[in-house]
Image (spheres, helix red, strand yellow):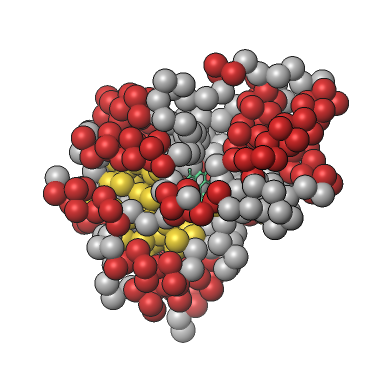
Amino acid sequence: MIRTEICDMFGIDHPILLAGMGGASTPELAAAVSNAGGLGVMGASSIGPRGLRDWIHRCRDLTDKPFGIDTLLPASVRRGTNLKSMSNGPLPQDLIPEYQEMVAAFLVDQDIPPADDKNIWPEPDGPPLLSKEFFEAQMDVIIDEKVPVYVSGLGNPGPWVDRIHAYGGKVMAVIGAVRHARQVVEAGIDAIVAQGHDGGGHNSPIGTMALIPQVVDAVGDRVAVIGAGGITDGRGVAAALMLGAKGAWIGSAFLASEEAGLFDGQKQAIVEATEESTIVSRAVTGKPARMIKSKWTQLWQESGREPLPMPFQTQISRPALFAANFAGRSQDVNPGFAGQGIGMIKAVRPAAEIMAEIVHGLEATLTHQFNELVR
Ligand SMILES: Cc1cc2nc3c(=O)[nH]c(=O)nc-3n(C[C@H](O)[C@H](O)[C@H](O)COP(=O)(O)O)c2cc1C
């Protein structure tokens, strides 16, 4: 069995973590990965505080193993710097009506009926999605519930580190550049996820193969570095370990699992995809993210309009993408975020089977291939 220091840190058997993927990494998926000896991390970026508590309870009902929660803590939103004007002059919030008009015309053109508002936004009586108050309310629940591992997908979890350590929890941060690694390490976190350009979701401009060793060199003597981005099978995990990482944070490989919180059309899009099927676009959240090419990404490429900064772009994208999902059009309009490794995914399978294959592939690569190479 291949073990590293993060196995002891998190109380897991294999140095493999399910990446927190907003909406996709459900309690069911996280529990399945934890039960298979990895660390299941739920993707709770868009789950309101009440829903988040339910998710934690659901996960605890399904596993007695450690698990984690990933949310977003973007500095631009917490500091309000997202409110400044766009490059062409107007304030982002002033452009919302004009952008909504463009999207309404797109939906008509695609023959997709608009979705009912009450099915789109989490907990309308709570803080608005992706606002500073929303992030803080999520953190209060995570701390109150003593979640074993907290991961910030964007931003610096520094202000919450002491409260999480006080109950014995661990804190990680996802970063995509060495300078961000240095910043979050100063905040006293326990481990860091270095996610490269190949990965699905919010995206670093630096390739995974180049990013991991440079983050290891910069901060690897202070915290465990976990590699991410395009790691889709045991060979990828072995490569991350060879680059100095202590484990792998794997997202897309679990998207076509039975437990992932995706629509069938989205899982089908992954199964049919090749390594060329993704694009980095700001069309969904306003920040660059890797996603499967679709009619939605094409709309923004051809519109000549700059997507709005986070969180305003979500006000434009979420109603349209939900409408596409409800109309059975997720495959061509909203296939979702995914990394460049999805060309390796050939079928929808139970998460336990995917985990077992990754673990077996890791062991096989490190033993057989090594023996073959050393003469
Ligand atoms: C569908 C999807 C949703 C994601 N949502 C989040 C998120 O909410 N928070 C976060 O930290 N990262 C998110 N990510 C990025 C993952 O945490 C992870 O870094 C990435 O999936 C790793 O690359 P891979 O997909 O090639 O394995 C998302 C990725 C995907 C594919």
Closer-to-camera residue (113/191): 113
Q: Is residue 326 above or below residue 5?
A: above
Where residue 46 appears, x then y in whole percent?
A: 47, 34
Q: Is residue 38 left or right of residue 83?
A: left
Say whether residue 165 is visible.
yes
Q: Is residue 79 left or right of residue 297?
A: left
Q: Which quadrant is home to the N terminus? A: bottom left
Q: Give the quadrant of residue 262.
A: top right
Q: Which residue is painted at 76% across and 21% down in the image?
A: 112
Q: Is residue 18 left or right of residue 229?
A: left
Q: Is residue 256 above or below residue 224?
A: above
Where residue 16 appears, x then y in whole percent?
A: 38, 52
Q: Which residue is painted at 14% across and 45% down in the image?
A: 167
Where residue 270 appears, x then y in whole percent?
A: 65, 40
Closer-to-camera residue (187/54): 187
Label count reads: 0
Q: Give the quadrant of residue 65.
A: top left
Say whether residue 36 is visible.
no
Q: Is residue 129 above or below residue 87?
A: above
Q: Which residue is painted at 78% across and 37% down in the image?
A: 295
Where residue 366 appears, x then y in whole percent?
A: 42, 66
Closer-to-camera residue (34/350): 34
Q: Which residue is painted at 39% across and 79% down in the image?
A: 217
Q: Is residue 72 left or right of residue 120?
A: left
